Amino acid sequence: MARKVRVEEEDAAIDMTPMLDIVFIMLIFFIVTTVFVKEAGIEVNKPGATQAIMPKNANIFIAITEDGNVWMDKREIDVDSVRANLERLMAEQPSDVVIVQADENAEHGVVIEVMDQIKAAGIDRISIAAKGS
């Protein structure tokens, strides 16, 4: 009498749960550490400069057009509301420098008013954007 031996084969499967956990942890890490730049929302014709450099931690831009319009966070704002908008952006993401992108034909008085509003918001470092040569 022949005995039949029953051999149970186990399915060799890789458990994907630990890998998915690590992927989700990495995703959360990259989302939390991402820096969001608040662009002005308009392109201006910046004056040229030979020593132009870009600050590394700049993430707030304010643009001033040739006809004196002020743009911040992709929308046109009034000069008197620069401080309030800047304080709102600073609450979302603190920054120690603001970059002013003034058109080369913009009125000097408007640029000074915007810089005064930036200073009133408590920011001491103001950079003026220029085209590098």
Image (cartoon, rainbow, N blue to C red):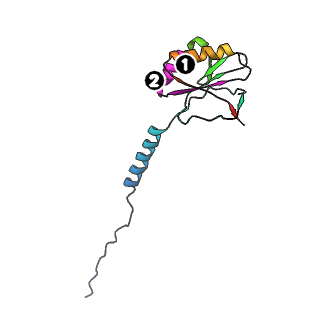
The residue drawn where x is 63% and y is 21% is 71
The residue at the far top in this view is 80
Comparing 23 with 34, the one in front is 34
Give the structural element (helix, strand or loop) at label 2: helix
Q: Which residue is mark 1?
A: 118
**Residue with the most extreme right position:** 105
- Left or right position of 20 against 39: left
Where residue 92 appears, as percent x and y from the top left, is 47, 26
Please check the rendered image and state whether residue 19 is part of the magenta-colored stretch, yes or no.
no
Q: Looking at the image, is 99 positioned above or below residue 54?
A: above
What whole-number distance in Å separates the C-alpha atoms at marks 2 and 1? 14 Å
The residue singled out by tag 2 in the image is 91
What residue type is disc 2 on? Ala
Mark 1 Cα within 10 Å, few/some/many (few <14, many 20+)?
A: many
**Residue 89 image offset from top left, x and y in percent:** 51, 23
**Does the rendering let one see residue 78?**
no
Q: Residue at x 71, y 23 (%)?
A: 103
